[in-house]
Image (cartoon, helix red, strand yellow):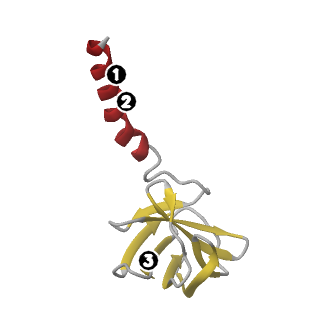
Amino acid sequence: MQRLILPLFLSVFLSLPVQAHDDHGKPRWGGVVADAGEFQAELVIRGGQAKLYLSDHAAMLPSQGGSGKLTLLAGGRKEELELKPVSDSALGGATTLKSAKGVKAVAVIHLPGRPPATLRFVFK
């Protein structure tokens, strides 16, 4: 019996980090994801709003007290947005640009207790 417990424990224990990273880097809201080292953000442009959903692997990060600047480049147009909390885990701002192939963006994010982070996005 003891010979079965150790291999079972090890197989469960060793599979946990893999499962925690399965969603890392994958979009949840239909946008594009960029990694900031300590956390990641997904940029979604929809309905005249650009939103950055903030997460630390599978856990959503609170956006309260956060701020930032988002620069969007699309078809020769440039738009700069001030980012403010728009939900519990998203920063956002109004935009006239739409999500499309080739749209590029750079965000500088300030979250309480973390160093400023720069993220780069490209819609494919």
Side of 85 where 11 appears, left or right: left
Question: The residue under label 1 is which amino acid type?
Answer: Leu
At 32% across and 19% down in the image, what residue appears? 5
Position of residue 28 relative to residue 5, above or below, is below
Mark 1 or 3, nearer chain start: 1
- Residue ID for mark 1: 8
Horizontal and vertical percent position of residue 41: 48, 66
Q: Secondary structure at mark 2?
A: helix
Q: Which residue is denoted by mark 3 in the rendering?
A: 106
Quarter residue 88 falls in = bottom right
Name the residue located 54 percent from the left edge and 72 percent from the top edge. Answer: 62
Q: Earlier in the sequence, mark 2 or mark 3?
A: 2
Residue type highlighted by circle 2: Val
| Alpha carbon separation for disc pair 1 and 2 | 6 Å
Viewer-side label of 2, 3:
2
Residue, disc 2: 12
Q: Position of residue 97 (x, y in %)?
A: 63, 77
Q: Residue 17, percent across and down?
A: 35, 42
Please report contact status of discs 1 and 2: CB closer than 8 Å, yes or no: yes
- Between marks 2 and 3, how big is the CA–CA gap? 39 Å
